[in-house]
Image (spheres, rainbow, N blue to C red):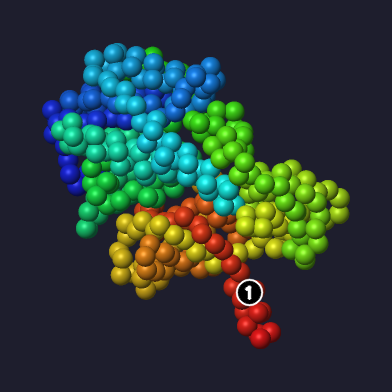
Amino acid sequence: MDTLDPNPLSPGDRVVVAMSGGVDSSVTAALLAEQGYDVVGITLQLYDHGAATARKGACCAGQDIYDARNVADSLGIPHYVLDYESRFSDAVMDDFADSYLRGETPIPCVRCNQRVKFRDLLATARDLGAAALATGHYVRRVDGPVGPELHRAADADKDQSYFLFATTADQLAFLRFPLGGLTKPETRALAERFALPVAEKPESQDICFVPTGGYAAVVERLRPGAVEPGDIVHVDGRVLGRHEGVIRYTVGQRRGIGVGGGEALYVVRLDAARHQVVVGPAEALARDVVRVREVNWLGPEEQARAGVAVTVKLRSAQPAVPGVFTLGADGAGEVRLASPQLGVAPGQAAVCYQGDRMLGGGWIAETASSADSEAATAAA
């Protein structure tokens, strides 16, 4: 299935495939069925699909369940739909709302992988007697000297390793990613070869419970009365205007801040306790110290505790930059970047790599500028 698979499966072994109803997971199921595995498709109903069903391109819409069932029927494999709405609401949606209210910019898809798919669904797969759980993620599972490693996908444009940083070693041993060595056009071609009914289905782009992209309205619905207005404050202390809630802003944002004229201003930080949106010039965004929490580390722990040279992705769409990661106590860690970066936002993830190997990462808790700290020390 994967290159250098440390735990090769034998034809006839049961493999559960997480089928979202999209092209990628459907091709995953088709490949495994063709290779002789006892494939069982499972689709998770994660959210009330009434509003999402009519919107094309919305992940986890009701249409997706229908599509997954049609694919399973075309492949001649059993297919089950599991109602995980309550688990998803508690583990993902509530966290999403609370994170925004703390002035963070969350990544609910990571939480979904961490707390639902690779925890609850993986446990269900084991209960069904499966030897592995397979997904349509573009990431590679590679044999290493001490066990499975997680590597970037062959298709750099489709690589999803950033979103899987919270995958534990135990989970990785049970997971398979058959598409990790393919490009998206190759996957599409396979869908056509297998004559899958979703072969031309467009990719989903939306968060499943935010089908219109209006995340602020979702937060207000989940936490009624919790969103409060406040001041837009310049880093020099001047009050420049008012805002309707910190949930409508993210660190690094320039457009739509609500103050115009004069210098170009960016959101530098969000002070949820004071209900303040702090803005300033681009240089005020520069940060080279990134502190993280809930670290999941797949690399050598002794190296990480001593400080290990890595490249770090601070947002999913940004290239990795050089730095040194040090693993602390109680799931904490710190990244010292080789050069300051702009727009590093709490709530996003700092994910560490060496070459193509994803070593692990954590949630960004706070950021700092070493230049500011040195200047403060000198002034004292």
The reply, left or right, for residue 129 in relation to residue 312 is: left
Q: Residues within 10 Å of mark 1 (few under 14, many from 20)?
A: some
Indicate whether 42 appears above or below 226: above
Decide if residue 137 is in sight here: no
**Residue 187 x, y percent position in the rendering:** 39, 28
- Under circle 1, the secondary element is helix
Toward the viewer: 38 or 114? 114
Indicate whether 69 appears above or below 319: above
Who's the residue at 18% across and 27% down the image?
37
Who's the residue at 62% across and 41% down the image?
225
Who's the residue at 37% across and 65% down the image?
330
Indicate whether 147 appears above or below 77: below
Toward the viewer: 362 or 99? 99
Q: Quadrant of the N terminus?
A: top left
Decide if residue 380 is in sight here: yes
The reply, left or right, for residue 230 in relation to residue 110 is: right
State which quadrant residue 3 falls in.
top left
**Residue 30 x, y percent position in the rendering:** 29, 23
State which quadrant residue 267 falls in.
bottom right
State the residue position of label 1: 371
Toward the viewer: 46 or 285? 46
Toward the viewer: 79 or 216? 216
Indicate whether 98 appears above or below 293: above
Who's the residue at 52% across and 51% down the image?
348
**Residue 107 x, y percent position in the rendering:** 50, 44
The reply, left or right, for residue 275 in relation to residue 97 is: right
**Residue 194 x, y percent position in the rendering:** 32, 18
Amino acid on which disc 1 is placed: Ala
Q: Looking at this rendering, what residue extends furthest in the right direction?
A: 261
